[in-house]
Image: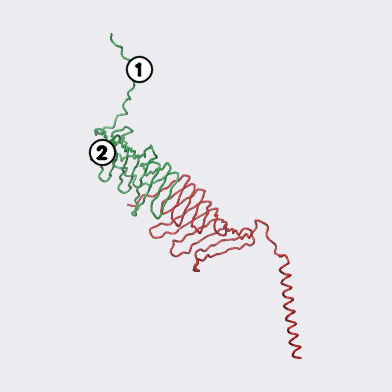
Amino acid sequence: MRDRLTMLIAAILLAVVTVTSYWYSREMRRPSIRTTPLPGTPDFIVDRVVLTQFDDRGQARYKLFAEQLSYFNENDDIELAKPRLVSLQPDEPQVQASSNRARITNAGERVLMQGDVLLRRAAAGDRPALTIRTEQMTAIPDEERFFSDLPVLIDQGGTRLAGAAMDYDNLKRVLTVSGGMRGEMPPARR
Amino acid sequence: MRILLTIALAACALPALAERADRDQPTIIEADRGVFDELKQVNVVSGRATLSKGTLRIAGERMELRTAPDGYRSATVTAAPDSLATFRQRRDPTRSGIEEHIEGAAERIEWDEKTESVRFLNRARWRRLENGVVRDEISGQVIAYDAAASTYRVEGSERGDGRVRAVIAPRTNEAPRAAPTPLRPSEELPAVRK
C-alpha cells in the first residue's frame, strides 16, 4: 500500500513537470500578443515624474523633474515636457536647467532643450551666479558642455552679454560667444 | 643701442582731465566673438573689437580684458597687422565754448579703469583737438598718460618713426579760430616782367 502511494506521488510529480515544461515551450514559441507601438509614438508615458541619477558611490548627482516623460523603445529616446534638472553635488555650485521641452538621445549622451531655455549656476565664493537664456540649447551632460546656435543672453554679476551663438564648458569654465557679441559691464563701485 | 628720450609735460602744459562723467558709465564691449575664461580670469574678444565707456572709445582687432578683485577693469587692445588701434575721449570742458577731444593711435593701447591711465605702445600718436582743430600733437615709441599726475610721458627710439616729435600750441583763453584756409595752388602765374 505504502509503495503504491510513493509510486503515485512520483507519477503525479512527473506529470506536473511534463505539463509545465510543455506549457513553457508553447509559450516561448507563440508570438508575443503585446501590441508594438507605431513608429514615432512612445512606448510609455509617465506624468509628473522625478528621476534621480546616482554616481558610483550611490550618491545622488542629479534630480530631473518633468510634467510628462515619453519613452521611445525604437531608439531609446526620451522626450520631456517642462523638464527641470537640478544638480545635487555638494562640492559644486548648484546648476539648474529648465525648458519647455527636451529630447534626450543617444542613451542620455545628448540633450536638446527647446523653448524658454534657462540655465543657472548658483554663486560660489567670489564667483557670482551665472544665468544663460536662449530658445534652444544642446547639452552633453557627461562633458558638462552646453552650446546654442541661437541668440543667447548671459548675465553674471551685473555683466550682461548678448551673442548670436555660444558654447560653454563647465569643466574648463570657458564661455565662447560667437557670431557678434555685445557686453555691458556696470561701473566699478567707488 | 636704443636711446630713449623722455619728456615729461606738466599739467599746466596739457590740461587734459578725463571726462568725469565717464567714470560712472558702464563699459560696453563689442566684437565678433569673445572667449571668457573664468578660471584664468581673462576675457579675450576679437574681430573689430571696441570698448566704450561714456565718451571714451578704444577700437582694435583684439582685446584682452581683466577684472581685478576690487572690480576695476583693464584692457589691452591690439591692432590688426599694418594697422593701428585707436583711442578717442572727450575732455571735461574747462573753457566755455571749447570742446576738447583727445585722439590717439598705436599698435597697442593699454587702458586702466582705476588709475584712468592710457598707454600707447609702438608707433604711438597722440593729439588734442579743440572744436575739431588739432592743437597739440605728439608721436613716439611709447606715450603714457597718467591721470593721477595729469602728465604725459613720451619715450622714443632714435630710429625712424619712433623719435619723439611734439607740437604744442600756445595756451590762450580764446577759442581757436576756425580751421585756417587751406593753401591751394595758384591758378595763374603772376605776369613775368620782361
Which sits in the foreground, A76 or A129?
A76
* Whether residue B30 is situated above or below residue A169 in the rendered picture: above
Tell me the mark number nearer the camera, choosing from 1 and 2.
1
First in sequence: mark 1 vs mark 2: 2
Location of mark 2 (residue): B14
Location of mark 1 (residue): B187
Q: Using the rendered image, report if marks 1 and 2 lie on a common chain.
A: yes
* Whether residue A52 is situated above or below residue B12 in the rendered picture: below
The percent coordinates of residue B33 (x first, y second) are 45, 46
Which residue does the image show at 72% across and 71% down from the upper left?
Answer: A25
Label 1 – label 2 distance at C-alpha: 41 Å
Mark 1 packing: few (<14 Cα in 10 Å), some, or many (20+)?
A: few
Which sits in the foreground, A85 or B40?
B40
The percent coordinates of residue B80 (x first, y second) are 39, 40
* Screen quadrant of the N terminus of chain A: bottom right
Chain coloured red in the rendered structure: A
Mark 2 packing: few (<14 Cα in 10 Å), some, or many (20+)?
A: some
Rendered hue of chain B is green
The numbered mark 1 sits on a residue in which chain? B
Residue type, label 2? Leu
Image position of A157 (left or right of A41): left
* Whether residue B24 is situated above or below residue B176 in the rendered picture: below
Quadrant for residue B120, please give it.
Answer: top left
Image position of B102 (left or right of A174): left
Residue reaching furthest to the top = B194
